[in-house]
Image (cartoon, helix red, strand yellow):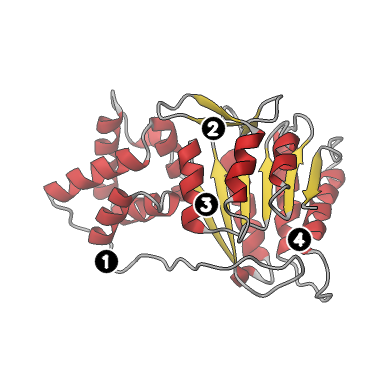
Amino acid sequence: MNISGPQSKKLTYALMDAFPNKASLEQMLSFELDKNLDSIAGGSNLQVIVFNLIKVSKAENWIEDLIAAARRSNPGNLSLQAIAEELLQNSQPEVISIPNTPIQQNTQQQKILILTAIPLGLRLDQEIREIEDAIRRASRRDLFDIRTRTAVRPKDIRRAIAEEKPQIVHFCGHGLEDGSLLLEDDGGNEKPVPPQGLALLFRLHADYVNCVLLNACNSLESANAISQHINYAIGMNQPIEDKTAIAFTQGFYDALGYEVKDSNQDIFQRAFDEGLVAIAMEDFSQESIPVMKKKL
C-alpha cells in the first residue's frame, strides 16, 4: 500500500485519537495482531511511537493489517474511520443491528462486545483468544460476531454499547471491593465506576443487551445492579484467580456454541453451568465464585 505524506499524518493523528495512551495502543496490537509494541516502535512520546509504528508497518508490508486492526478495535472513532475508509476502500465490515433475543435457543446472530481495561498483570489477551477459539470451534459459529474495545474509559463503554448494540457484553479487567469496575480516565489513570452507574447505563440498552458477564474480582454487586434491567448478569463474589476466570470463560462460550436440540432450554443458564464445570474439572477451588443473577 502506498501512503502519501498527508495520509500518514492523518493516520498518525487518528491512531493517537483512537488510542490516546501507550497502554491502549499496546493492547490493540497485542489483541488484534499478536504483536509487541515495544519490540516494534519506541519513542519518547505517543506521537513518536505512532510515527515509528506506521513507518515499520509500511516497511514490513503490514500497514493494511494495522489499519484494519485499529478500526476493529475502535470502530466508533470518526477520525480513524475516515482515514481507514480512504486507505482501505470498501473494506468496512457490515455491522448488523439485531433486536433483543429471547432467553431460549435462537438462530439470530449474536454480537459479543468484549471490553477490557487496565491489565495490571492480567492475561486479557489470552481471555480474548479463548473466547474467539470457543466461537471458532462452535457448531453454530456463524451466529456470533465478536467486537473488542480496549483500554476503555467510561465514555468509551457508553459509546461502544450504543454503537455496537450487542446481545452479550463481556467485561474483563479489575473490580474493587465495593463492587466498582476499574476503568481508565483520559490520562490512563484508574477510574472506578460504581454499580449504580453501571445499572443506569444498561437500563438504556435493555432492548437488545441480553447478558452481561463481568469477569472481574468482586463484581457481584455490579451484576446485582445490572440485573434490575438485563435478563442475565454474571459477577464474581470475591477475588478470582486469572486462570480460574479464563477457565470459566472457556466453558461459558463453549456452551453458547453448542447445538441444542431442546428449543426451550435456557442457553445462558446452560452456558453458566458449563463455566462452573470447566472450573471444577480443572481442579480449581473457586467454582462457587461466579454467580448469575436473573432479571426478576
Residue bearing mark 3:
161
- Residue 85 in sight from this viewpoint: yes
Q: Say above or below: 72 vs 151.
A: below
Query: Mark 2: which amino acid?
Result: Leu
Q: How many marks?
A: 4
Residue found 84% across the figure and 75% down from its top: 262
Discs 1/2, front: 2
Q: Say above or below: 228 vs 97.
A: above
Residue 183 image label: 2
Residue 89 image label: 1
First in sequence: mark 3 or mark 1?
1
Discs 2/4, front: 2
Tell me whether the residue at label 3 lies in contact with that at label 1, contact meaning CB atoms closer than 8 angstroms. Answer: no
Discs 4/3, front: 3
Query: Mark 4: which amino acid?
Result: Ala
First in sequence: mark 3 or mark 2?
3
Q: Say above or below: 75 vs 156.
A: below
Residue bearing mark 4:
255
The one nearer the camera, 87 or 209, is 209
- Where disc 3 sits, the SS reads helix
How many C-alpha atoms fall within 10 Å of the one at disc 4: few (<14), some, or many (≥20)? many
Estimate the spatial distance between the alpha carbons at disc 1 and disc 2, rounded to whole Å.
Answer: 34 Å
Question: Picture quarter containing residue 286?
Answer: top right
Residue found 31% across the figure and 51% down from its top: 78
Tell me whether the residue at label 1 lies in contact with that at label 2, contact meaning CB atoms closer than 8 angstroms. Answer: no
Estimate the spatial distance between the alpha carbons at disc 4 and disc 1, rounded to whole Å.
Answer: 37 Å
Discs 3/2, front: 3
Q: Quick check: 151 left or right of 212?
A: left
Estimate the spatial distance between the alpha carbons at disc 2 and disc 4, rounded to whole Å.
Answer: 29 Å
First in sequence: mark 2 or mark 4?
2
First in sequence: mark 1 or mark 2?
1
